[in-house]
Image: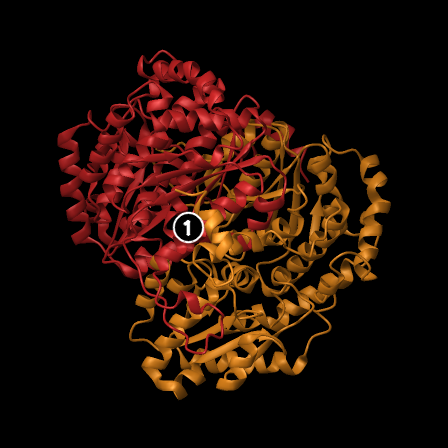
Chain colours: A red, B orange
Amino acid sequence: MVRLCKDYIRPFVGEDELNNIAPMVSAAFNLLHERSGPGADYLGWIDLPVNFDRDELERIKSTAGKIRSMCDVFVIIGIGGSYLGSRAVIEFIKSEMYNRLGDSPEIYFAGNNISPVAMANILRLCRGRRVCINVISKSGTTTEPAIAFRVFRELLEETWGEEGARERIFVTTDRNEGNLRKFAEQKGYTTFTIPADIGGRYSVLSPVGLLPIAVAGLDIDELIAGAAQARLAFSDPDPAKNDSLCYAALRNILYRKGRVTEILVVYEQYMQMLCEWYKQLFGESEGKDGKGIYPSSVIYTTDLHSLGQYIQDGMRNQFETVLWVKEPDVDLAIPDDPGNIDGLGFLSGRSLAYVNQMAMKGTLLAHVDGGVPNLVIEIDKRDERSLGGLIYFFELACGVSGYLLGVNPFDQPGVEKYKKNMFALLGKPGFESRKKELEGRIR
Amino acid sequence: MVRLCKDYIRPFVGEDELNNIAPMVSAAFNLLHERSGPGADYLGWIDLPVNFDRDELERIKSTAGKIRSMCDVFVIIGIGGSYLGSRAVIEFIKSEMYNRLGDSPEIYFAGNNISPVAMANILRLCRGRRVCINVISKSGTTTEPAIAFRVFRELLEETWGEEGARERIFVTTDRNEGNLRKFAEQKGYTTFTIPADIGGRYSVLSPVGLLPIAVAGLDIDELIAGAAQARLAFSDPDPAKNDSLCYAALRNILYRKGRVTEILVVYEQYMQMLCEWYKQLFGESEGKDGKGIYPSSVIYTTDLHSLGQYIQDGMRNQFETVLWVKEPDVDLAIPDDPGNIDGLGFLSGRSLAYVNQMAMKGTLLAHVDGGVPNLVIEIDKRDERSLGGLIYFFELACGVSGYLLGVNPFDQPGVEKYKKNMFALLGKPGFESRKKELEGRIR
């Protein structure tokens, strides 16, 4: 299960502070469970691990098997929550080099940017190969995935014809609403559902995340089972008995002391996309109304030789949350160096995983001594079940933390603002006066 | 050349503020050029683009050519400044998918972490292939690269024998000092020099960066020429006539108003490692004595659907610096969608690069309206010359910015602290009492 270690916030947060805030934490938790707080229309994630469409899950598994056998390259088209969750899970389990190391199909993520370089690269990797795509969008009108869908639909139709393309296009969208739903039915594409009561950043355990994760060959039953286990384990409204709530409480206590940036610390490159998922989850949920903890991340020991200096000795407005997997699944012994040219003779024959762990512990103490509160979140294994639990732990903590902060954790009004400006500058009909105004302000 | 656009800090910084700080900026610049400030032993980078060992440069080019022909996989062993610069340059020019897309050799970076997973992945990719390595370390005793050097030396010696390994190991280290220098000469490895007066984070244009960059097939003459051009272009001590100094001035003005986090904004995945290089450069130079701007980064429009909400509407303690390449080198037209299912009919046939640019401009205005000061740094092209100029622009700005802040921008005392703890916990001889103390503090 997921555990929170709070030994290393002792010099910064007193036990009484946790007690003092506990009633408000319980109130926030109750707001969630009673569906009575702001954003209550988007709480489908709370019971999702036990309350999902079982037929659809089976259909995801069988479709994933079919996709695995029928293509060399699987392109996932989606932005934000429509790709971060699945990418985080795939890289966590298979490592960030999965396309280099793994069995087929290769998996690429498109439609999460407007870069012609990124698009051209993926198109080059698709050339002459059997391609399937999964387009993931609630409405079908979000610019980035919509453009990519045009490009890849054209590619598939030109290569395989209308009928061949139909077999290679998989659509994850709203059950009833939206242009993409209409279009998919008209074309006869295989479709999966984005639950109406789950927002993008909370959607990894819905078909949004599950189809790509299954295509990567991972065990989605285990992922869901881990989340269901966490749902039970973190069901007590008392933060003293609920590590997820305790984490939410501590981040708010630290924030109110001026610790306005949280640095998620990992020691493995394969967790980088999990950090990106966490950034969206917390940043988009809490960053509003002029408030919010800024979510940042580092990969140690790599970044101990980069941002490490700042975190050790710089401005004291941050705290770190270390994410740690207890049991290493890969290890190797450090070879001997008879000449001891590196002066590390005491490491000969030692386990690399053990050295990494001692680096983690040493860093933790060094940063605490440097004035940085450190939380540690630990899971047992690098497997689907543990990761499912961790995902639920973070989702719950985020909802409670947002309510504690006093915001609606389930909306994202700020995301519209760049879109409106972009549409205006691009001459979208209806935006004429805004276009004129904006053009007067840019050179 | 590199240009700074300051149109979008107008609502936040008055023209008089820039005038008021100008004499201090000039003083900081003069400290650098007169070599009279703290850390003056590490100012070799200032004249490096015109004052380098030309024989060594030719030797780097010929060796790189040899390496390109003799291996399938080139492994660069180094941490911090010993790999971030070269990786940033290689990915900027060739894109982050270079191993997937490019000609051989494939290039991997090892020895920048203690992860057994990362090490095992690279070893798997080396299996049965012709491998060359470049180990980059001033002393040869830094834990991460030292362990990796043991592993890869063993691999090469087991596969190719002592003599074969000798031909495949390339060492970049101090000219005279250190265990690695001694060992390399004893073994007869080909060596290159880390200049004694250049710190790791300033070393990309020295042999540290140049050999890997040349092995990747890039034009290192052009890279150096761009830096030399920037050295001349940014030689005026008056920030009103020197965009690099003006950037240093503005970040310090913003910092003093409580803008304690700088977010480097890019619109291309291929710039991610450049962001990481920037984080080390500024974070390690400025994050000390309880001070410093925290360097962070985002990739738009991707992260507009992640951290975008926070940056638009969250706590107002940040500023953004947008990095933009003026002339796109790759482009494609957005296909038509006759049914206009995505509602983006007005984009049919438009250039993707143009849409990306309008997203940039729209975002800039949206974030300024949201209360976030925005700076824009623009270079002309995605090529070696422009990038060389940008590197020099940032290096100079960083030195001046650090002096303005009142720190020694060229040391990194905090980096030692985790190492000492790690050594103690691992039982390094001489650390016995520290080991006991630390073990009493961890569970």
In the rendered view, would you say B58 is above or below B354?
below
Quarter occupied by the C terminus of chain B: top left
Residue drawn at x 83%, y 56% as measured from the top left: B30
Return the residue at label 1: A267
- Name which quarter of the figure residue B130 lies in: bottom left
Q: Report the quarter where the N terminus of chain B lies.
A: bottom right
- Name the one closer to the observer, B338 or B114: B114
Q: Is residue A155 left or right of residue B96?
A: left
Q: Is residue B103 visible?
A: no
Q: Position of residue B335 (x, y in %)?
A: 40, 45
Is B271 drawn above or below residue B429 in the view shown? above
Would you say residue A197 is visible in this rendering?
Answer: yes
- Characterize the local packing of mark 1: few (<14), some (14-19) or many (20 or more) Cα atoms within 10 angstroms: many
In this rendering, is residue A268 above or below B128?
A: above
Q: Quadrant of residue B200?
A: bottom right
Q: Depth check: A157 or A248 in front?
A: A248
Local SS, label 1: loop
On the image, the x and y values in percent for residue A5 come to 39, 35
Q: Residue at x 26, y 27 (%)?
A: A233
Residue at 32% in and 47% down? A92
Q: How many marks?
A: 1
Q: Nearer the viewer, residue A139 or A98?
A: A98
User: Going 38% across and 71% down the picture, which residue do you hit?
Assistant: B151
What kind of residue is marked 1? Answer: Tyr
Instruction: Specify the quadrant of the image occupied by residue A177.
Output: top left
Furthest toward the bottom, the residue is: B163
Disc 1 is attached to a residue of which chain?
A: A
